[in-house]
Amino acid sequence: MSDEHSRLVITDEDRSSEEYQAARYAYELGKAVRERRLELGLTQVELARRSGMTQSQLSRLEAGGAEPTIRVLDRLAHALDATLEVSFVPRAA
């Protein structure tokens, strides 16, 4: 494989794109779900069952490959014995 195809380069333009931001949020959300699941000692199968999802759906979410609805997030919060918080934080000037 050539070097051209084996390296991912993210430009400043990419970082400001809506797609990049959505992917970043999905990754951070998945990471938070995974960390809380592990804190509770749950497997993906157990959490999926508690939240009304399949294990593959949960796996995709934890990997940052899903953009769940508020309803799904609420079910996950309940299954993770957590409170769902959504906020808008002003950007630094």
Image (cartoon, grey):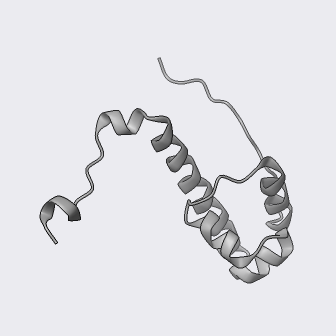
Q: As displayed, is residue 74 above or below residue 48?
A: above
Q: How many marks?
A: 0
Say which residue appears at 83% left-offset and 77% top-offset: 49
Residue nearer the viewer, 93 or 54: 54
| Residue 17 x %, y % | 44, 35
The reply to whether residue 45 is visible in this rendering is yes
Farthest residue in the top direction? 93
Say which residue appears at 36% left-offset and 39% top-offset: 14
Q: As displayed, is residue 90 above or below residue 25?
A: above
Q: Judge left or right: residue 34 versus residue 52.
A: left
Q: Judge left or right: residue 55 versus residue 92.
A: right
Farthest residue in the left direction? 2
Q: As displayed, is residue 89 above or below residue 39?
A: above
Residue nearer the viewer, 5 or 89: 5
Residue nearer the viewer, 56 or 76: 56
| Residue 61 x %, y % | 63, 63
| Residue 85 x %, y % | 76, 44
The reply to whether residue 35 is visible in this rendering is no
| Residue 3 x %, y % | 13, 63
Q: Judge left or right: residue 72 versus residue 66.
A: right
Q: Quadrant of residue 86?
A: top right
Say which residue appears at 79% left-offset and 62% top-offset: 76
Say which residue appears at 76% left-offset and 50% top-offset: 69
Quarter of the image with the N terminus is bottom left
